[in-house]
């Protein structure tokens, strides 16, 4: 079973049943998917410990504004800015991100991070961040001037600072003017202000999208991806949403996480058939979900824990609607 992480978080609206709750945010991690709803409640599906939850199921909590998930845990930021998870509480938070075994938040202009059993600690060099992303043991922050800094695990080049090494000190990502960023298990991608996408880190399955399989510790541009509005990093694959509301994926495809019926790896961005009006995309371990303009949420890829939310454990090679009951 798959237990490593990927987190990606995006603002959404709508759901596919006529009177279903409005999904404001969707996150994917490992074999689990969670949604924060407009009514302040939250639902999750997929792996829950040793149990497979095949359809969205309500979880404890009210007044939820944002969620993130890690390896065996989930964090929620309340509408009052309070975050409680991994045995710690942070107040006044404006953003939230989870890696495999850690969580980070922006609070009072500072970035604070913590693990189970450790209190939240301010990250030197990350003050003033406007957004966060995390995955595996890596965290990245984006700043108002378009710069990005990453820290944590970096042995595969996923920090983008030119080195294949870990560091606890936030390091400037080389040469990027960043709009947003996403972190996978061992690779990272960013949407730039010129609406192109650049990636760095591991490239074993083509997840950097440059047509090669060589890891890179500095950003490489993804050919053919233009007018990008969002990027999502899975364990070994990447997807981008473009300004025309299409979704393009590349990287590992052994269980159709890049939405192709054949080919174990996809080395160039390929359009996902069936996602024509996507408003957001997220990626977990070997699966992908997208929110559509008409309110439907569709997922594809591995489904051994029910992470696609369609009521089955069947692998899907085409975008399939989740079963979002009342």
Image (cartoon, grey):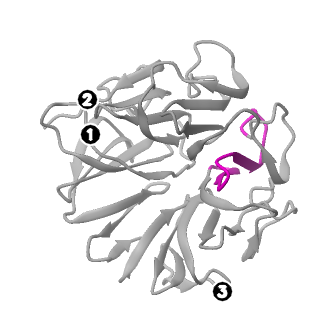
Which quadrant would residue 307 be assigned to in this image? Answer: top left
On screen, residue 179 versus residue 28, left or right, reads right
User: Disc 2 designates what residue?
Assistant: 323
Residue beneath the point at 39% across and 31% down? 308
User: Disc 3 designates what residue?
Assistant: 124
Which range is magenta?
184-207
Which quadrant would residue 17 be assigned to in this image? Answer: top left
Q: Is residue 138 magenta?
A: no
Q: Are marks 2 and 1 in contact (CB under 8 Å)?
A: yes
Q: Residues within 10 Å of mark 3 (few under 14, many from 20)?
A: few
Name which of mark 2 and mark 1 comes first in the sequence: 1
Vertical arrangement, residue 130 with respect to residue 174, above or below: below
Measured from the top left, where is residue 35 in percent x and y?
A: 32, 49
User: Disc 1 designates what residue?
Assistant: 56
Q: Residues within 10 Å of mark 1 (few under 14, many from 20)?
A: many
Residue beneath the point at 56% across and 22% down? 256
Name which of mark 2 and mark 3 comes first in the sequence: 3
Vertical arrangement, residue 186 with respect to residue 106, above or below: above
Which quadrant would residue 69 be assigned to in this image? Answer: bottom left
What kind of element bears circle 1?
strand
Q: Nearer the viewer, residue 101 or 297?
A: 297
What kind of element bears circle 2?
loop
Q: Is residue 191 magenta?
A: yes
How far apart, in angstroms, are the residues tagged by discs 2 and 3? 44 Å
């Amino acid at each position: 079973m798959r237990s490593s992480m990927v987190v990606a978080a995006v603002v959404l609206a709508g759901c596919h049943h006529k009177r279903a709750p409005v999904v404001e945010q969707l996150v994917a991690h490992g074999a689990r998917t969670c949604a924060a709803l407009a009514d302040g409640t939250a639902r999750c599906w997929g792996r829950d410990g040793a149990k497979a939850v095949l359809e969205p199921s309500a979880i404890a909590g009210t007044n939820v504004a944002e969620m993130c998930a890690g390896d065996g845990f989930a964090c929620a930021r309340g509408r009052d800015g309070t975050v409680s998870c991994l045995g710690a509480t942070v107040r006044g938070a404006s953003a939230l991100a989870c890696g495999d075994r850690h969580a980070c938040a922006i609070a009072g202009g500072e970035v604070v991070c913590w693990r189970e059993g450790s209190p939240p600690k301010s990250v030197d060099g990350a003050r003033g961040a406007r957004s966060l992303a995390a995955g595996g043991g890596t965290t990245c922050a984006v700043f108002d001037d378009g710069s990005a800094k990453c820290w944590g695990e970096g042995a595969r080049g996923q920090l983008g600072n030119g080195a294949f090494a870990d560091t606890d000190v936030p390091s400037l990502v080389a040469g990027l003017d960043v709009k947003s960023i996403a972190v996978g298990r061992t690779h990272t991608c960013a949407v730039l202000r010129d609406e192109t996408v650049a990636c760095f880190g591991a490239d074993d399955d083509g997840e950097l999208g440059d047509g090669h399989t060589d890891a890179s510790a500095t950003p490489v541009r993804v050919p053919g991806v233009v007018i990008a509005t969002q990027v999502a990093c899975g364990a070994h694959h990447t997807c981008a949403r473009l300004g025309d509301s299409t979704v393009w994926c590349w990287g590992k495809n052994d269980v159709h996480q890049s939405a192709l019926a054949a080919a174990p790896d996809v080395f160039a961005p390929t359009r996902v058939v069936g996602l024509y009006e996507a408003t957001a995309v997220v990626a977990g371990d070997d699966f992908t979900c997208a929110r559509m303009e008409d309110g439907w949420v569709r997922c594809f890829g591995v489904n051994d824990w029910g992470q696609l939310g369609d009521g089955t454990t069947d692998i899907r090679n085409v975008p399939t609607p989740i079963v979002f009951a009342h």
